[in-house]
Image (cartoon, rainbow, N blue to C red):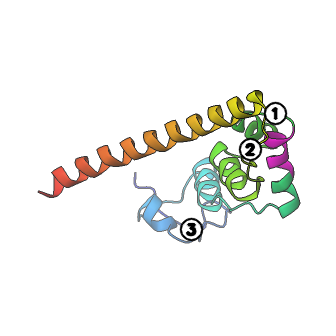
Amino acid sequence: MSWGLGSGCQGWDCEGPGLSDIVGAGDDSLPMEVCKLVQQSVSSVPTKRVFSEEFKVDAVRLVTGEGYSIAAAAKSVGVGQQTVRKWHARLAPQPVPCGDGASVEELRAENDRLQREMRRAELERDILKKATAYFARDVL
């Protein structure tokens, strides 16, 4: 038995974009359950969510002001970690460098922050270096 578009899929409106590609061509009508599943899969195209600037600032404030990690803030507001990371890079205030009159604690905190930043940059550099070598190997 071939499953095709048939005569209206037993009362369901199965004339949708690309439906014949999904189901195939034939003379028999689809069972109602199959037609309903195909309609749901065709109509469930993910949509891009749009967030207000205030929402983004509040999500970043969780990280900067409340001490949340990026992962915890992302889970809390229901978005991906990479999304919160991008918002943080764009919206978070830049740390103020220590001046001449800084205390030992402030200098240590600044040193720790800069070391973390450097480790992350070195890791990103190493990843890019390996990726470049991998793709260059495939080309040659």
- Main SS of the magenta part reads helix
Disc 3 vs disc 2: Cβ atoms closer than 8 Å? no
Q: Nearer the viewer, mark 3 or mark 2?
A: 2
Could you tell me residue 81's position as x and y percent? 66, 43
**Secondary element at tag 3:** loop
Cα separation between marks 1 and 3: 60 Å
Badge 2: how crowded within 10 Å, few (<14), some, or many (20+)? few
Q: Residue at x 58, y 35 (%)?
A: 116
What residue did someone put label 2 on?
Answer: 100
Residue 129 or 95: which is nearer the viewer?
95
Image quadrant in which you'd find residue 10: bottom right
Q: Which residues are magenta?
A: 58-65
Position of the C terminus, as image quadrant, is bottom left
Could you tell me residue 52's position as x and y percent? 84, 63
Q: In the image, 108: left or right of 122?
A: right
Q: Residue at x 70, y 38 (%)?
A: 70
Question: Given the image, on which type of amino acid does mark 2 rest?
Answer: Asp
Residue 140 or 90: which is nearer the viewer?
90
Q: In the image, 74: left or right of 131?
A: right
What residue did someone put label 3 on?
Answer: 7
Residue 109 or 83: which is nearer the viewer?
109
What residue did someone put label 1 on?
Answer: 67
**Secondary element at tag 1:** loop
